[in-house]
Image: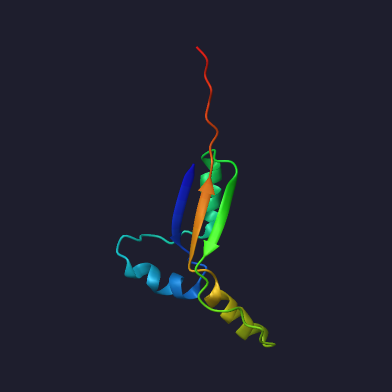
Amino acid sequence: LMFLETPNPENLRVGSCSFYADPTHRNPLPPDTLFFMVQQRGFRPVEVERFGRSLPISDSKDSDLKMLFDWAGVEQDYAIIGTKPILNISL
């Protein structure tokens, strides 16, 4: 079982500011990228769990304003959970 948790760069506030406040953070990893990397290492199934929504999604009629609020309101963190089958080798 693998559980990886990281800040979500899809959130505007996290991706532009708070991610870099922690000096141990080197490069932001979007959920799709980390999902792909974990799958390529043989983990199946792989799930993305998002948590820490910062703002409510806007119900504005202005599409640009709605998109901005939606990007700012995306969950602040996410986790990738994957399992890898155990190989049974008989001797």
Q: Which residue lies furthest to the left in this view?
A: 23
Horizontal side, residue 20 vs residue 69: left or right = left
* Residue under the image location 70 percent in, 87 percent down: 61
The residue shown at (53%, 26%) is: 87
Query: How many callouts does the rendering have?
Result: 0
Q: Which residue occupies 60% across, 43% down? A: 45
Using residue 62 as the reference point, say whether residue 16 is left or right of it. left
Snapshot colouring: rainbow
Q: What percent of the width, then of the height, locates residue 5?
A: 45, 56
- Farthest top residue? 91
Q: Which of 51 and 69 is in front in this view?
A: 51
Q: Where is residue 6 in the image (x, y as percent from the top left)?
A: 44, 59
Splitting the image into 4 quarters, where does residue 40 fall? top right
Residue 71: x %, y % from top left = 56, 75
Query: Foreground: 10 or 83?
Result: 83
Res 16 → quadrant: bottom left
Position above or below: 79 against 56: above
In this view of the protein, which residue sits in the foreground, 34 or 47? 47
Q: In this view, does 76 lie above or below 82?
A: below
Viewed as shown, does residue 67 lie left or right of 79? right
Query: Is 47 placed above or below 90 here?
Result: below
Residue 47 place in picture, x, y as percent: 58, 51
